[in-house]
Amino acid sequence: MQRNKIPFADLYIKEKKHRKEDMLSIKNLQAKVEDKQILKGIDLQVNAGEIHAIMGPNGSGKSSLASVLAGRESYEVTGGQVTFDGKDLLELSPEDRAREGLFLAFQYPIEIPGVSNINFLRTALNEIRAYRNEPPLEAKEFLRLTREKQKLVEFDAKLANRSLNEGFSGGEKKRNEIFQLAMLEPKLAILDETDSGLDIDALRVVSNGVNKLRSNKNAFIVITHYQRLLDYIVPDFVHVLYDGRIVKSGTKELALELEERGYDWIKEPVTSESV
Amino acid sequence: MDNKSADILEEYSDKEYEFGFVTDIEMEVAPKGLSEETVHYISAKKEEPQWLLEWRLKGYHSFLKQPEPAWQNFELPKVDFQDISYYAAPKSKAKYKSLDEVDPELISTFEKLGIPLSEQKLLAGVAVDAVFDSVSVATTYKETLKEQGIIFCSISEAVKEHPELVQKYLGSVVPHSDNIYAALNAAAFSDGSFVYIPKGVRCPMELSTYFRINTENTGQFERTLIIADEGSYVSYLEGCTAPKRDENQLHAAVVELIALENAEIKYSTVQNWYPGDKDGNGGIYNFVTKRGICKGAHSKISWTQVETGSAITWKYPSVILQGDYSSGEFYSVAVTKNKQIADTGTKMFHIGKQTKSRIISKGISAGEGQNSYRGLVHVGSKAEQARNFTQCDSLLIGDRCGAHTFPYIESKNKTATIEHEATTSKIGEDQIFYLNQRGIDTEKAVALIVNGYAKEVLNQLPMEFAVEAQKLLSISLEGSVG
Ligand SMILES: Nc1ncnc2c1ncn2[C@@H]1O[C@H](COP(=O)(O)OP(=O)(O)OP(=O)(O)O)[C@@H](O)[C@H]1O
Ligand SMILES: [Mg+2]
């Protein structure tokens, strides 16, 4: 593959525009929440088989981008287009986006008391299957799949049987997101700071899981603050989001540079431009 | 909740009541109104002994004297007691010897409700007594139960076959003068179920009664009496439905439970009477008196209720903990949506020493539903080391509904321990979004969240019915949320 030779996403978009493996294409996406403009024109192209890392200072809009893609109601899209697998993503309901194969591993996973993790996953899986006109999984087959995926991402069976995230530690919640990811096998997974809160072993386990799950049919967008994660999950591209825009794109070396230099050198030009 | 959610909330607020059909069958209906004559008429129809007639008449006179209560947390609708017919029975035959004699229309009614009456078709291990308007139409598995000395029949039949038991216990827990609706029931009760479990017998199957109001302008006043003799155990379940009608119908039942030494009674209710339409027209007034007594030491009574129907649900299944070391439990899920009202809870009377009670109440309000928990924990002076734990949670869906709690505690013994916990929560938009993000639509998401919330109570139901109750919860809340 030649993709490492093209360091900038802009170029990249032009090159690959009409290729078959186009998965997600974001053009000039703008969104606001409670009258505050958060996303100010995002362009991003993600193809099957790729891993994109998104970095950027706190509050720059990374989770907002993930939320808008997943269809959170509180965000209002004020401009731009997003196509996902040839479909207009912004037209779809949140559940249909999920059923189309978009998965968001939440920065802050939600607790749902009394709903067993397994029951929840079975419901989710069967809803997704129904959308594809597939019959529900038989109990036996579902259990087999559960065991297989638990093993793959080294997820504790005890947690699988507990109420959904209820009383889970921060790290356990994050690992549950990856377990769900493994179960639902989405086309595109967005991991929003899945690494934060994980201990060193868990980080390795989760990364291994992701690496095992990746294929040339799926893609990942990995939001993180730490270069460390990218040692395990090696990205094809790294983007820096700042003040609602992608202000820099590059290869994995960019992450190393950011680690060394911080964000100030990237912030500068944007600030002077906008003054 | 934001605007879009609110819209969806509006959109779905009236979910069709799926049991709202009417069975077309010839009925014998008493003229409207209650008088001494009506009481005589009912008693004569049922060929009752003199003592029962007299007891009914005492009930009638007590009914005349009592004012309607004024303490409830809703406006009591005017019930015209003279506009109700107090007796309705399928005409064909007063009493059925076997299922073959029952009008096929009746059988099919119960089948439509998912209650097959032929024994082969029944859920394994569940015996059913079906009450249609005022009369018990069929009791299944009677013979099997009889082998163990268990009596499970209609109360009319028990009056004839086991008068000594009925006379001893009828009205012993809920007296004929207890409250106006109980007095009305004493005067006019038509039928109901009777259960007696002999000493040391563990009832091998779930006993269950299905109540169905069919005829217009009738009330249903059934009376249930369950006696668990020393060291016995029984689990009993009642379910109820009624057709859709524009007028309100009164359901004023009485349930009495008696647990002797070391006995245990588990009583479960899945109440799904017609709730009225979305504007609050029609629906059942479910004004019921349920009370049990733990008469003997180490006895136990447990009430579980899933209340999704009725325009107004007003009841407090209670336990008198008379025997030392006895224990009482109350597990409740009450759902109110549209204009439904529930004012429900329990009373635990700790009289014996070392008595224990546990109250778990889960209210769910949607639409403009109003849900009140009202509970009394009373500890008498002799109730050394009595213990109570109460947890009372409210879940709100949307912002036009209401949840209220009225916990009362009266303790006359310093050694008692009484704990009360209460929470109020809303279904969070972020919870729904989380489930949406996994491919689950909002309606299913709400069903999942609500069933999770009510799980502790649903878990108390006998297995066969837990699934049914889960479905019922999901169905009755269908579309209540965005
Ligand atoms: N509901 C809201 N109301 C007002 N402002 C909001 C709301 N949600 C997000 N924001 C703002 O949007 C901006 C972007 O937030 P976002 O969570 O996307 O940042 P982030 O890049 O993910 O940050 P972090 O690295 O801290 O996770 C922040 O300034 C945040 O305060
Ligand atoms: Mg974030």
Image (cartoon, grey):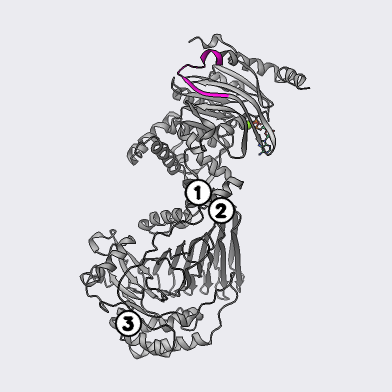
Residue B397's tag is 2
What is the three-letter code of the residue carrying label 1?
A: Val
Residue range of the region highlighted in magenta in the rendering: A13-26
Q: Can residue B306 be seen in this view?
A: yes
Q: In which quarter of the image is residue A253?
A: top right
Q: Which residue is drawn at 39% across and 36% down?
A: A129
Between discs 3 and 2, the one toward the N terminus: 3
Q: Position of residue B423 (x, y in %)?
A: 60, 56
Q: How crowded is mark 2: few (under 14 residues within 10 Å), some or many (20 or more)?
A: many
Residue B28's tag is none
Asked whether B301 falls inside the magenta stretch, the response is no
Which residue position holds label 1?
Answer: B446
Q: Is residue B152 visible?
A: no
* Residue farthest toward the left in the current orientation of the protein: B100
Between discs 1 and 3, the one toward the N terminus: 3
Mark 3: which secondary structure? helix
Mark 2 — on which chain does it sit? B
